[in-house]
Image (cartoon, rainbow, N blue to C red):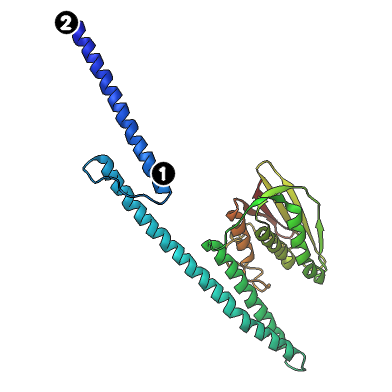
Amino acid sequence: MTYAILAVSILLAVGVVLWYRRRTRRILENLNRMLDIAMQGDFTEASFDETMLSALESKLAHYLAASTVSARNVQTEKEKLKALIGDISHQTKTPIANILLYTQLLLEQPGNRDCLDALEGQTKKLQSLIDALVKTSRLESGVIALHPAEGNLQTVINTALSQITPKAAAKDIQITLEPTDADAVFDPKWTEEAVYNLLDNAVKYTRSGGRVSVTATAYQMFSAIHVSDTGPGIPEEEQPKVFQRFYRGTEHAEEEGVGIGLYLVRQIAEGQGGYVKVSSQPGVGSTFSLFLPR
C-alpha cells in the first residue's frame, strides 16, 4: 500500500511538473507572439478575461499606443525643427549676400575704407556663425543622420587640405602631409567637415611663417587623424573647455572665429562612434586628434 501511494504521488508530481512546464511554455509562446506582432506594429488585445495574460496584453497594448503617439510627436517636432532650421538658413542667406554685395560696391569707391572693411569682416563672421549653427543644430536634432562606411582616410584628408591651402598660403604657413593607408568607418562628407575645422583652427592660431602637419595612424580599435601646429598652445586648465560651444580662449578673444568649430568636430566624432582630444604645450603648439572606429 505504501509503495502504491508513493508511486501515485510520484506520478501526480510528474504530471504537475509536466503540466506546469507546458503551461509556462504556452505563456512564453504567447508572449513571444505578442512581441512579434508588436514589433510589426499590428498589436491588438486578443482576449478580455481576468487572466494574468490578458492583463499583460492590455498593459502592452496601452504601452504601445502611448509609444506610438510619443514617436509621432517626436517625429512631428523633428519635422518642425527641420523646417525652422531650413527657414533660418534660407531667410538669412539673401540679406547677408546683399550686404556683402553692397559692401564690395562701396569698397570700389574712395573713402570710408576702414569702416567698410570692418563691415565686410563682421558680415562674413555672421555668415560663418549662421552656417555653423545650422550644421550643429541639424546634427544635434537628428535631422541629418551620419552614414558611416569603411574607407581610407587619405581621400578625406586631401579634400580638406585643398580647401585650407589658400588660407595657409596667405599667412605663409607651411602644411605637410604624411601619406597614409589608414582606414576607418566614417561618413566622408561630415568627417571632411571635421578635418577641415581642425585644419582651419590650426591655421588660424599659427603665426605667419609657422607650420602645420597632418598625419594619420591606425590602431587596433581606432584610426586617428592628427593635426599639429606651431601656434601659441593652450594652457592646461583651458584644454577641457575648448570643445564647448562658443568657448574662446582668454588670450585669443580678439582672433577671428565664433568658437563653434571644435564643438562641431566633437559632435561629428561622437555621432559616428569616435572622439576627439587635444594635447598642447603653451609656447610650443597643439595637436588635435580625431579618432574614428575601425
SS at mark 2 in the image: loop
User: Between residues 26 and 195, which one lies in front from this camera angle?
Assistant: 26
Residue behind mark 1 = 36
SS at mark 1 in the image: helix
Q: Position of residue 80 (x, y in %)?
A: 47, 70
Q: Position of residue 254 (x, y in %)?
A: 66, 74
Query: Dividing the image into 4 quarters, which one contains the C terminus?
Result: top right
User: Between residues 237 and 82, which one lies in front from this camera angle?
Assistant: 82
- Asked if residue 78 can be seen in this view, the reply is yes
| Residue drawn at point x = 71 percent, y = 53 percent | 225
Query: Dividing the image into 4 quarters, which one contains the N terminus?
Result: top left
Q: How many numbered discs sit on the rendered protein?
A: 2
- Asked if residue 113 can be seen in this view, the reply is no
* 22 to the left or right of 96: left
Report which quarter residue 172 is drawn in.
bottom right
Q: Amino acid at mark 1?
A: Asp
Q: Position of residue 249 (x, y in %)?
A: 63, 66
User: Which label is found at residue 206?
Assistant: none
Relative height, residue 35 to residue 147 (above, below): above
Residue behind mark 2 = 1
* 231 to the left or right of 12: right
Q: Amino acid at mark 2?
A: Met
* 42 to the left or right of 94: left
User: Between residues 170 and 210, which one lies in front from this camera angle?
Assistant: 170
